Amino acid sequence: MPVEIDIAKVAQLARLALSEDELREYGAQLQDILEHAERVSALPTEGVSPTSHPLPMTNAFRPDEVRPSLNRDEVLAQAPAAEGKYFRVPRILGES
Amino acid sequence: MTDWEAVIGIETHVELQTRSKMFCGCEVNFGAEPNTMICPVCLALPGALPVPNEEAIEGILRIGAAFDCDLVEDSFFHRKNYFYPDLPKNYQISQYDVPICVDGHLDVDVDGEEDRIGITRVHMEEDTGKSVHGSETGRIHGADHSLLDFNRAGVPLVEIVSEPDIRSAEQARAYAAELQRVVRSLGVSDVRLEEGSVRFDANISVRPVGQEELGTRAEVKNMNSLRSLQRAVAYEIQRQIALIESGGTVVLETRHWDEGAGSTSGMRSKEESEDYRYFQEPDLVPLHVDDAWRERVFASLPELPAIRRRRFVAAGVDRQTASVLVEAGDLADLFDQAGELGADVKAVANWLTGDVVAYLRRNETTLADTHLAPAHLRELGEMVSAGDLSSTAAKDVLGRVLDGEGTPGAVAAAHDLIQISDEGALESEVSQVLADNPDVLDRLREGDMKPIGFLVGQVMKATRGKADPKLVSDLIRQMAQEG
Amino acid sequence: MSDLADLTIAEAGKQLRNGAITSLDLTNATLARAAITESHLHAYLTLNQDAARNDARAADKALAAGDDHGPLQGIPIALKDNMSTRGTETTAGSKILAGYVPPYDATVVERLRARQAVVLGKTNLDEYAMGSSTENSAYGPSRNPWDIDRVPGGSSGGSAAAVAVGSALGALGSDTGGSIRQPASLTGIVGVKPTYGLVSRYGLIAFASSLDQIGPFARTVDDAATLLEAIAGFDIRDATSYRGDAPDISGLLDVGVVGMRVGVVKELSGEGFDPQVADACSSMYDLLADAGAVVSEVSLPSTEYALSAYYLIAPAEASANLARFDGVRYGLRVDGDTTEEMMANTRAEGFGPEVTRRILLGTYALSAGYYEAFYGQAQKVRTLVRNDFAAAYELVDVLVSPTSPTTAFPIGERTADPLSMYYADVCTIASNLAGDPSGSIPIGLDDGGLPIGFQVMAPALHEAQLFRLAAEVERLASFNRRPSLATSEVRPA
Ligand SMILES: [Mg+2]
Ligand SMILES: [Zn+2]
């Protein structure tokens, strides 16, 4: 079965500002790869439970203990934009 | 015109008060300087990994148990993917199709009307950072930029989702208030709305009474007090009814409650598509809660508010009074202590919720700062039932005990409030009054009992109110017959 | 006289302790080798010459004082640049992290430092470890020391090239679908991907969290075991870290393979496999049988689906793992009127084509309506792959195959065709899906003088069996050739 991909929507979900040409090119490449992957979707897997993890482990916790935090100046020095004690970003949509 | 029914479900987010964050060792400290409680994990630096805080898991299990949920044996963490600047990883670690607690309920009481509200699920997740708009001038509408503080990012967050069982704004408020009482009684969070350590979002729809299928719902956010929750729900219900009756249709959206304007308005949604692409968090392994753990959690629960209320009612206290007692935990504790000493619980309940509450309000003080002790309440009860104190005198005595004048007995004696209930002591007073009023006595003898009240009054006056009125009228009858 | 840069870790350790050499000598020799070879290979993104010499002096001081920190003390080691190093730029081969200087060390880095290893610098890789040739590095490709017109494999190509040429005695890489084993194979050295969870991932910049694993590169099986023993073990900072005691690793190196049941993977041969690679492996199967191993053919029927499942699972996890690179807290920012635009501009500009392709692929595979058909189904195939291995290990102790279907391919040959590039991992991917340990050992050269690698796979936590067979393969192959670049130009003719 041919795979239909709304590549512009996918790029939006992934927060990637791609040009029309790029979208077309990546869309085509995804087609190829996914049609190859079709063999997987075609495989009969009734009653097969998914493996999301190679380790048969549960309850890996840490005790509720406070550890030292990082130095703010050292952290803000890595920020593309900072203002005083804060990270600075352009206007955020969806907030008033 | 149609009668409308509101259908309301509430999503509650509770910040747990653990020492450290959900997935890292940073301190949970709301007062801290911006961006000082951050580390590679909660700042999502490249290569950092989350490790769950055992205490937080313990906390959510206690909350689930308190709502009588099933504590799920095997549950999972998922990644909820959406880009937002206050979410450092640009995905939130949450739980999706298999949360840790399911199928609970909370009984809520509106003016003595108790209803059971279903709790669909209680799941574990992490909080986001905070964004401040503008800078110099603080929060500006349409600020040209925002400032980010990640101290709150990764604080343990418990989401409690109710069934759409709530039918009114009052009930929504009652649900929220009872939920706060329960969580507070567990000591896992201070659930302060003002400080955002608890947040309520309401999913509201309306439908004609009798109609089965649900109307389109709107989710209302940003209520920072129980009062504003009730107002917001009431407003939204009316908005939707008016909209539909004027031929409009409700749209599925998130609406923002504006406390000042007293109205809700539509908000632009965060992730336009709302396609969160959930998948099992590969950096974490499944949660496994075995029977032993489950039993430990249930055994560790304190007496929950609803249970306590029921116990008080069973002891003979009326619902209303029981609720007032439980609401103010210290009154309920004093009530229990007096009860253990064998005090008359009905009388004690009424004094505590009536006179004592009024006294505390009047003097702007707390129970702990008064001198009232369980033994005082027992003694006061005994004096009344023994007829040594009239109910009015009892109130007088209670006030003085609260002031610290001493035990009820001592106070009553000091102020000469002991009631005369010994016939011998009264007979002389009565015969004196009869002698002073021969004409009235004649009417009694002719069978006209009307003036008896007058005579009782005379005796009470003569005894400065200390005589037992019932005993006095009995004596008058007797002596009138004897003539 | 041989060059110190060509010493094995074991031999260098002896000479450091008998006073024949110092760590500073060793480190200088390694840096001298790098000075000659880097212009050809570009194995390193960052070489910390001064810091390395200081590490060396500290190690020499401790050794002189009889303060022995074990076999890595004073040994010059290279780190793949997707491991967080406090104070040293860490880019994961991506433009989006250019100039990013981490405030913390990865657990493996802490462990190497605790053993006083000398950290030389950070090696080149395919951006975010996505690739099989190191051509996807935003900082230019690394080259194969056996033929600088060919790729060293990937994604850990820089680490492999450095160890092969002698600009490091050992190195760490990461392996998500073959990124240690395939470059080890293409550069003629030993590379091992341990059992998932044996080595902490804390500080490893994530590609696919359920598949990533850090492991060693070395010139001998013994050296690889030494490196792995130094970094293995439980770490509270990694919730997927194995909680039991670290299993034995080097205990069976010398016992040989008499009676050992060795399964040859039926599906990893034939079409698509370079005949010279196939022949070299076949003769090794015979040599193993002669050495007393019980060699038989075993089938892993789901192998043909493993590659496709991998190319759904890994990108899906990556699409979320790489969401944090958004221009807000660190790294590149390309501005925009709103934060949403800034993020989208930054990511479009900062990620290279292969990374962009995989983010799109993974986002799609997880999106509403496609999850079950793609990601959900791939996770089930993963179960089938695990079942295959479980069944195989009922019959045999270890499995063997070629590491790569071909020897090193020319730079640029496969960049235009993603699928052909993906095929380079066909032999290695199954071990990642299963979480089992697997390694590559050089067994010879093809007619073109390019190394051929032999893959050994073992059940989870059975590293000792893996190294047992690997050691025997090494003895039987007696492969002792070095790339021309490591010899010819280094010493005056
Ligand atoms: Mg939530
Ligand atoms: Zn933190």
Image: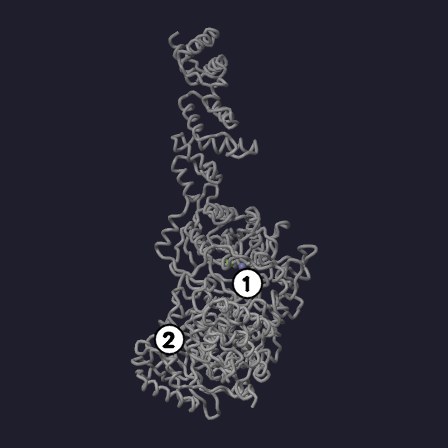
Percent position (x, y) of residue C35?
A: 59, 81
Percent position (x, y) of residue C412?
A: 55, 86
The answer to whether residue C177 of the structure is visible from this angle is yes
Q: Is residue B123 above or below residue C173?
A: above
Q: Nearer the viewer, residue C411 or B322?
A: C411
Q: Is the C-beta of the residue carrying label 1 under 8 Å from the nearest atom of ligand 2?
A: yes
Amino acid at circle 1: Pro
Which of the labelled discs sits on residue B40, or is there none?
1
Which residue is most to the right? B136
Amino acid at circle 2: Leu
Q: Is residue B119 above or below residue B80?
A: above
Q: Secondary structure at mark 2?
A: helix
Of badges 2 and 1, the one in the foreground is 1
The answer to whether residue A44 of the structure is visible from this angle is no
> Where is mark 2, residue-wise?
C384
Characterize the local packing of mark 1: few (<14), some (14-19) or many (20 or more) Cα atoms within 10 angstroms: many
Please give the chain letter of the residue carrying mark 1. Answer: B
Q: Secondary structure at mark 1?
A: loop
> On the rendered image, what quadrant is the C terminus of chain B found in?
top left
